[in-house]
Image (tube, coloured by chain):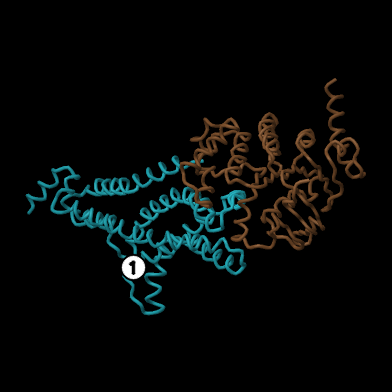
Chain colours: A cyan, B brown
């Protein structure tokens, strides 16, 4: 046993990654991160579109409700929201939500607010002339939306929505604090379990986690940039 | 004189409590070119916008080819708008479509025409305004004057019976005004009914069959262009025209 430990200590710290199923475990953790982000994004985007359209209403009550919701979500740190949902619901209603479900609820609440604001911005940035010149060509309100307004709104929106997804992926690193074992927590477990055999493992493991995040978000970010450039007008 | 194509009776329009049009009566005959003049805020642009239903009117009727077109819903109005082409002051092309698609979108989606014939006609019209080489370009690549010529072509491709021009050169750089006005002069020569709001006096005098002078929400004076520009009947029209003369005389003194 002692011999083994000494042997291990002679190896470069990065080799811990290839011991047992450590790398597969990290990838498993990354999958939890991606799964939570994707479920949240898939739910947030349609809800955000509806919320954005709702925010465009001139009704003062609708305006007040959406303002309060948006500001509340924006002002609260995501961590506080996670604690409120994870611990607060149990305490207040005796409901025991899993960490993952709590995380998805918080990310959907947050994503809907952010996406809604993006939709509102994209819709209100379409000049009134676009509606009028399309109407003057004999298009019905439905045709104006389908052929003129929605295509222009989507072009402005999609790059922004994709950026929102990368922000979600990064923010999932907070959910360790409500006990969800995602990529960061898996990394910490590997470091802790090998504290004596590989005392310097922290740096390489966190380095690998850095690259896992990077190679998840980078292609998404490139896609956003590409679409933005292609649709610039 | 030809038959009456557009008839406006006792048209009133107000925004909140501001009365913009206070009882306008106007008949426009088939093939006639009518130029609306008047000081800013006199209601001439609002009158054009009421004709194709971009503004809801408070009172009165608008009749096109004997059919009442005022007081209709937006969806109903789209049918009449196909007969009335309109070009605006702002360069209002669809930025996400190239030039040929800008022109053929409404004919294909609204009138159900096929792509090949719509595009052929679009190219013929683009050639007439000297922009055939721009068919694949996007609006952002065009100058203001080029965009306005495309906007005119886009309206013409719908085969309107009548065209409304709302200060189409007001936002253009001076050197681009001419190219747009020339296109309009050519159209007028082909017998298209036109209602034009403009501040280009020389152009108004050249193109108009009839000048309508508006002030304070009323039609104050109407006559043929020669009479209007040489012997205006009302004091308000005289004052209005003197504004332009004053600008001209001052410019001459400056340059000496």
Left/right placement of residue A94 relative to residue A74 reads left
The residue lying at 57 percent from left, 67 percent from top is: A62
Asked whether the viewer can see residue B171, the reply is no
Give residue B25's position: percent from left, percent from top. 81, 55
Q: Is residue B245 above or below residue A207?
A: above
Q: Compared with residue A178, is residue A230 higher up or lower down, i.e. above or below? A: above
Q: Nearer the viewer, residue A102 or B64?
A: B64
Judge by depth and name the residue closer to the eye, B211 or A52: B211
Identify whether A90 is placed above or below B206: below
Question: Closer to the camera, A80 or B185?
Answer: B185
| Residue at x-position 51% and y-position 37% | B138
* Badge 1: chain ID: A
What is the quadrant of residue B128 in the picture?
Answer: top right
- For the C terminus of chain B, the quadrant is top right
Residue A171 visible in the current orientation: yes
Image spot of residue B122 (x, y percent): 53, 39
Where is residue B240, by image quadrant? top right
Residue that mark 1 sits on: A101
Q: Position of residue B219 (x, y in %)?
A: 84, 50
The outermost residue toward the top is B256
Where is residue B52 drawn, in percent x and y?
67, 53
Q: Camera-side residue: B62 or B56?
A: B62
Assess disc 1: are there few (<14), some (14-19) or many (≥20) residues with their C-alpha within 10 Å of its C-alpha.
Answer: some
Give the residue drawn at x 38%, y 51%.
Answer: A166
For label 1, the SS is helix
Q: Residue at x 78, y 62 (%)?
A: B17
Q: Quadrant of residue B209?
A: top right
In this picture, residue B41 sits left or right of residue A165: right
């Amino acid at each position: 046993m002692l011999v083994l430990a000494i042997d291990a200590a002679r190896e470069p710290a990065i080799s811990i990654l290839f011991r047992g199923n450590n790398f597969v475990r990290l990838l498993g953790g990354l999958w939890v991160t991606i799964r939570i982000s994707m479920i949240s994004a898939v739910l947030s985007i349609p809800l955000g579109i509806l919320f954005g359209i709702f925010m465009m209403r001139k009704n003062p009550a609708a305006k007040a409700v959406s303002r309060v919701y948006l500001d509340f979500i924006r002002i609260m740190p995501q961590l506080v929201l996670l604690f409120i949902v994870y611990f607060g619901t149990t305490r207040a209603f005796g409901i025991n939500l899993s960490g993952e479900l709590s995380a998805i609820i918080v990310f959907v609440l947050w994503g809907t607010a952010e996406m809604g604001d993006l939709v509102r911005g994209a819709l209100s940035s379409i000049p009134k002339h676009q509606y009028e010149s399309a109407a003057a060509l004999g298009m019905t309100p439905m045709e104006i939306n389908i052929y003129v307004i929605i295509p222009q709104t989507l072009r402005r929106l999609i790059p922004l929505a994709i950026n929102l997804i990368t922000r979600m992926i990064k923010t999932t690193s907070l959910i360790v604090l409500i006990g969800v074992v995602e990529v960061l927590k898996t990394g910490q477990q590997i470091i802790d379990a090998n504290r004596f055999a590989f005392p310097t493992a922290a740096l390489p493991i966190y380095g690998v986690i850095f690259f896992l995040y990077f190679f998840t978000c980078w292609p998404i970010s490139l896609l956003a940039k590409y679409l933005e450039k292609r649709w610039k007008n | 004189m030809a038959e009456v194509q557009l008839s406006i009776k006792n048209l009133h329009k107000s925004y909140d409590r501001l009365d913009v049009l206070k009882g306008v009566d106007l008949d426009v005959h088939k093939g006639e070119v009518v130029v609306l003049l008047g000081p800013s805020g006199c209601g001439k642009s609002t009158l054009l916008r009421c004709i194709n239903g971009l503004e809801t009117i408070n009172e009165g009727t608008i009749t096109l080819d004997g059919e009442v077109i005022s007081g209709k819903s937006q969806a109903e109005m789209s049918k009449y708008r196909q007969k009335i082409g309109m070009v605006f002051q702002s360069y209002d092309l669809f930025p996400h479509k190239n030039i040929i698609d800008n022109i053929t979108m409404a004919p294909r989606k609204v009138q159900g025409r096929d792509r090949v014939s719509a595009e052929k006609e679009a190219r013929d019209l683009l050639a007439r305004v000297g922009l055939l080489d721009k068919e694949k370009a996007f609006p952002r690549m065009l100058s203001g004057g080029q965009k306005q010529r495309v906007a005119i072509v886009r309206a013409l491709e719908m085969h309107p019976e009548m065209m409304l021009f709302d200060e189409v050169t007001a936002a253009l750089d001076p050197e681009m005004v001419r190219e747009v006005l020339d296109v309009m002069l050519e159209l007028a020569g082909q017998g298209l009914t036109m209602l034009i709001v403009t501040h280009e006096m020389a152009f108004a005098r050249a193109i108009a069959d009839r000048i309508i002078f508006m002030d304070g929400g009323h039609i104050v004076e109407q006559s043929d262009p020669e009479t209007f520009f040489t012997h205006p009947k009302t004091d308000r029209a005289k004052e209005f025209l003197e504004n332009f003369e004053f600008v001209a005389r001052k410019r001459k003194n400056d340059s000496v």
